[in-house]
Amino acid sequence: MSAPRGRREGFATAVLLLLALNGTARPAGAAEGSARELRFGVIAEEANEPDRMLRVYADLLAEMRKRLAPKGIGVAPLVITRDLTDLSQRLKQGEVDMVIESVFPTLELQERSGQNLMPHLAIVRREQREYHSVFFARRNGAIKTLEDLRGRTLVLQAERSTSAFAVPRAELLRHGISMVSSGQAAARRGSVFYLLAGAELNQAIWVLNGKGDDGAFSDSDWTHLPDKVRNELMIFHETRPLLRGALSLRVGLDRGMERSCEDILLSMHQDAAGQSALTNAAGITRFERLTPRDLAELGEWRLALKGSSAPK
């Protein structure tokens, strides 16, 4: 679904301003670089996100440029897109070559782009290669199992989140429980209603304050809650684990570029400059090769996603 006009205009204005200031980003649809340039695409759904994306990935792009230059490969300015639909179109059109995302957006991009994206490397983020979702509620409340959620309100983060939207939804469906947006009048009896809080800490606070009955996000988010908040909550259900994230490359990318990209990323954590660039890129520790087990589990999660509404 396309973004509202006001948000699209805000996005475009923000990107153009950034281009004028430093020339380090290319809005989706701008002129392409040479055939030997690698183009990294990201999603910035809110008007203030393009600037944040530039800060997050600036050092990683700089290190990639330095390490790929001897191989005759350049790295284009960051390609900033509005949403999954926008990014999938850029993949179809060959305007994006590389994507770093969590599992469910990756699988959704594969499908929307006509299978023009393929996971290549696993992302280890903050020393965590896998994570899982936890369902939590007030410690002294009535909710003890997933069945207790029927007719109640679940506080989630955002529809593009893997651990705080897509996995909880798939887990509820696995237990025969549908999940619908709060206030949806035509909801099936016994459904769970959800609200979006925008941030993990907000989810916990909303549950504590009674704005929702329970919440769900990753086990890592749980450990990072302030003690005074976490002590008032309890975990009552946990899902099976999945990859923390994947680095994917466009299908049809030049094989030499593909191998070179993999090689420099797999070794980047081995020196101080590379490790610093990875850490600044939202806490990446290192990249690892995907194993046969990883690929099999991605296939299983793809089937789980088909049973629920896809993230936007």
Image (cartoon, rainbow, N blue to C red):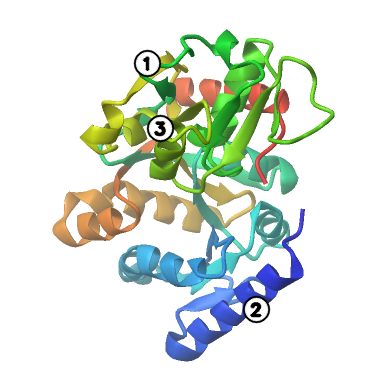
Type of amino acid under label 3: Leu
In the figure, 93 relative to 233: above or below? Answer: below
Q: Earlier in the sequence, mark 1 or mark 2?
A: 2
**Label 3, label 2: how many angstroms apart (C-alpha)?**
46 Å
Viewer-side residue, 267 vs 298: 298
In the figure, 244 relative to 231: above or below? Answer: below
Secondary structure under tag 1 reads loop
Which residue is tagged 1? Answer: 140
The part of the image, by quadrant, that contains residue 110 is top right
Q: Earlier in the sequence, mark 1 or mark 3?
A: 1
Which residue is tagged 3? Answer: 208
Viewer-side residue, 64 vs 196: 196
User: Residue at left 52%, top 46%?
Assistant: 248
The part of the image, by quadrant, that contains residue 83 is bottom right
User: Residue at left 52%, top 21%?
Assistant: 297
Secondary structure under tag 2 reads loop
